[in-house]
Image (cartoon, rainbow, N blue to C red):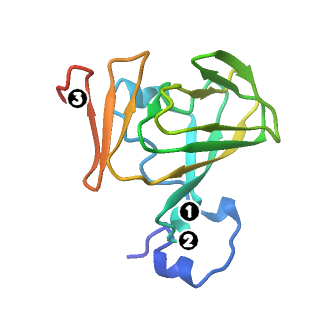
Amino acid sequence: MQSDEPSVSDAASKAAMVALDVPLHAKQTHYPEPFASWVCGREKRRLGDAFGLSNFGVNLTRLRPGAVSSARHHHTRQDEFVYILEGRPTLLTDAGATALAPGMCAGFRAGSGDAHQLRNETTEDVWYLEVGDRSPDDQASYPDDDLAVTVSGQGYLFTHKDGHPY
């Protein structure tokens, strides 16, 4: 049986590829409901995984009109960076809303406590690159929602803020 996803050995034999040739990731979100429904209209192509990168991830992400990147969140250990390729998303942080345009970028330092989210409030698709490190034992907090996550070698553990699992 042949897989649609490139394997690490496939990537090792390629020095370059067309980003849109990287298949959409089979699982577009790890969020439990109702949060999983919030990111409908978000599509990720895991470019870093296609090359077998293990220290950081790179995603080519598309937000269809009305879609959001995630629930608004901040990380304890993971730095994140986004670079807008196409479209005009709105960045929501603790400071408020900022209109972004192609060529603009934003960075989110681990441990800053400044929660962030991208929203596509337009009628056109938004395309951006997102880069994040793969720090072990990362946690994310969601100040607007009853949601928390711990990321470990075993995967994602989503809980309510009081600690009980979804």
Q: Going from the N terminus, do you reach mark 1 or mark 3 first?
A: 1
Q: Nearer the viewer, residue 112 or 13?
A: 112
View extreme (front): residue: 112
Q: Residues within 10 Å of mark 3 (few under 14, many from 20)?
A: few
Q: Position of residue 160 (x, y in %)?
A: 25, 23
Say which amino acid is labelled 1: Gly
Say which amino acid is labelled 3: Tyr
- Under tag 3, what secondary structure? loop
Asked if disc 1 and disc 2 are in contact, CB closer than 8 Å, the reply is: yes
Q: Residues within 10 Å of mark 2 (few under 14, many from 20)?
A: many
Describe residue 83's horizontal placement relative to residue 77 as left or right: right
Q: Position of residue 145 (x, y in %)?
A: 39, 17
Q: Position of residue 93 (x, y in %)?
A: 59, 21
Q: Nearer the viewer, residue 88 or 96?
A: 96
Describe residue 154's horizontal placement relative to residue 89 as left or right: left
- Under tag 2, what secondary structure? loop
Q: Which mark is residue 51?
A: 2
Q: Nearer the viewer, residue 46 or 40?
A: 46
Say which amino acid is labelled 2: Phe
Q: Position of residue 120 (x, y in %)?
A: 67, 26
Q: Which quadrant of the rendered structure holds the N terminus?
A: bottom left
Describe residue 145's horizontal placement relative to residue 41 as left or right: left
Q: Going from the N terminus, do you reach mark 2 or mark 3 first?
A: 2
Q: Quadrant of residue 34?
A: top left
Label 1 and label 3: CA atoms lie apart by 29 Å
Which residue corresponds to the image point at 60% horizontal and 63% vertical from the top-left? 22
- Under tag 1, what secondary structure? helix
Which residue position holds label 3?
A: 166
Asked if disc 2 and disc 3 are in contact, CB closer than 8 Å, the reply is: no
Eyeballing the image, is 70 above or below 16?
above
Which residue position holds label 1?
A: 48
Q: Which mark is residue 152?
A: none
